[in-house]
Amino acid sequence: MGGKIITVEIEDLAFDGKSVAHLDGKVVFLDGGLPGETVTAEITRSKPRYSQATVLEITDKCDARIPARCSHFDHCGGCTWQDLEYERQLHFKKKQVSECLSRLGGLEDVAVDDVIPSGNIFDYRNKMEFSFHVIDEGGFHLGLHRRGRYDDIFDLDRCFLQSDTANEIVHRVREFVKNENIPVYDLRTHTGFMRFLMLREAKRTGQIMVNIVTNAGDLPAQDRLVERLTAEFPNIATIVHGQNSKKSNIAVSETENVLFGPGYIEEQLFDCRFRIRANSFFQTNSLQSEVLYETGFDLLDPKPTDRLLDLYCGTGSIGILLASRVAEVVGVELVEDAVRAAKDNAELNDITNIEFFQGHVKEFLKALRPEQRRFDIVVIDPPRAGLHPKALKRTIGLGADKILYISCNPATFARDARELTSAGYNVSKVKPVDMFPHTKHIELVALFSK
């Protein structure tokens, strides 16, 4: 039996991308609808303080609504704002950053700049992950998750966030698996073989990586697959077969076998070259990452005598790009593969005043001897969860003059910013940078000074 049918006017967009309305004094979060629109919706969940609903019909559309370009828009979990004019997307992203700072960080006086827009609003992603999924009819899908579902994958026709070549590769791999009768992994029974297809495409160099992740075992007909893909797509620089026998549904391999090429692709940022392996972290929007980094570097204004600590350094891109502007760089990263890549990237770019350490940031900081603790600058680019409380406390304890914080989550940034300002650091402004058009996500950068 369906839920209650309501008619409401959309007032705002929430931090998670849902639209917001009010009914009888209670907040309603809706899937669908844009601010200024009147919609008919069905209540799907009711709580004492809020309700959740799904839009059934838009009875009065707003001027900012545009036709979504993608045929998968109505069911894909990716581009939730593709039907909203890009300028309005930037407006709501800035608004979300401001609200996080004031409500979660208590930082009412911190200015938030207008969002720096992305140069490309389509074909900007250098990495996409696709899942294989068994369907009841005995076949399979290869594509992306349906909105709000971890256990339902739709067959991808075309994703406009990646290149036409990448879309064609998805089709060829799907055809190959079907024609070769290779069994697809079933999440319910944990049987079958094909699990994920990951594509990485360097936007500056054009090099493409095909990473096929399967259950344990050799990839059937792998020579034929390599021959067909490399013949049709000459930009494929490497093909990797990763194996993951764990039940957890993540596209990370336990072991890897390079089927073609060197096992990595190379991307260019500014005047530096970076090698990216299958499981390396690298900013997803290569071209806009230059804008993000330069925005941060301009705020930082490093001196040639500075000693810099790069926390959560990934494959070393920030530290390597800054190495020519400072005296010394120390990078810290948990993922062992990323540290190896960072060392390779430093060598590739003839950077000699940098060293990398593998381990948890909080443990690295705890183990520093007194004579090692002097850093003029700390750069922080943490995962979405922000800094571990102990890592943040120990970072503050270093007493660096400047802390450059790059964040992909305004909420956890606001939480950490509150602690930094309470410890005596000042932050005058936050600069949002849009790395992910048509999605709810926003990157930002801010400088904390003593």
Image: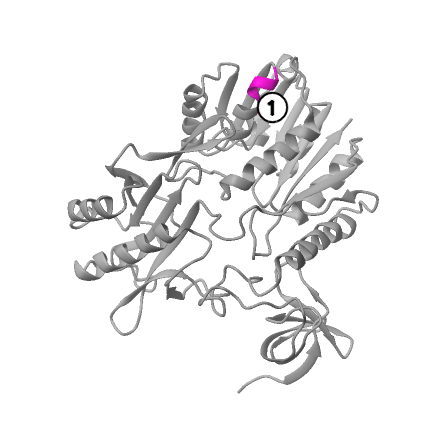
Most extreme residue toward the bottom, as rendered?
Answer: 1
What residue do we see at 66% from left, 54% from top? 90
The residue range painted magenta reads 322-326
Q: Please name whichever residue, 163 or 49, is drawn nearer the observer in this view of the structure.
A: 163
Magenta portion: prevailing SS class: helix
Considering depth in this image, is 97 or 367 the residue closer to the camera?
97
Would residue 227 be found to the left or right of residue 212 on screen? left
- The x, y position of residue 386, in whole percent, is 62, 42
Q: Is residue 223 above or below residue 352?
A: below
Question: What residue is shown with label 1?
Answer: 309
Where is residue 442 shown, x and y percent of the image?
62, 49
Q: Is residue 325 magenta?
A: yes
Query: Disc 1 residue type?
Result: Leu
* Between 300 and 108, the one nearer to me in the picture: 300
Q: Tell whether position 141 is magenta.
A: no
In x, y percent, where is residue 446? 70, 37
Q: Is residue 132 left or right of residue 19?
A: left
Taking the spot 78% from the left edge, 26% from the top edge, the residue there is 450
Around disc 1, counting alpha carbons within 10 Å, would you say few (fewer than 14), some (14 to 19), or many (20 or more)? many
Helix, strand or loop at mark 1: strand
Q: Does the rendering let one see residue 141?
A: yes
Query: Across the whole image, how many numbered discs are drawn on residues?
Result: 1
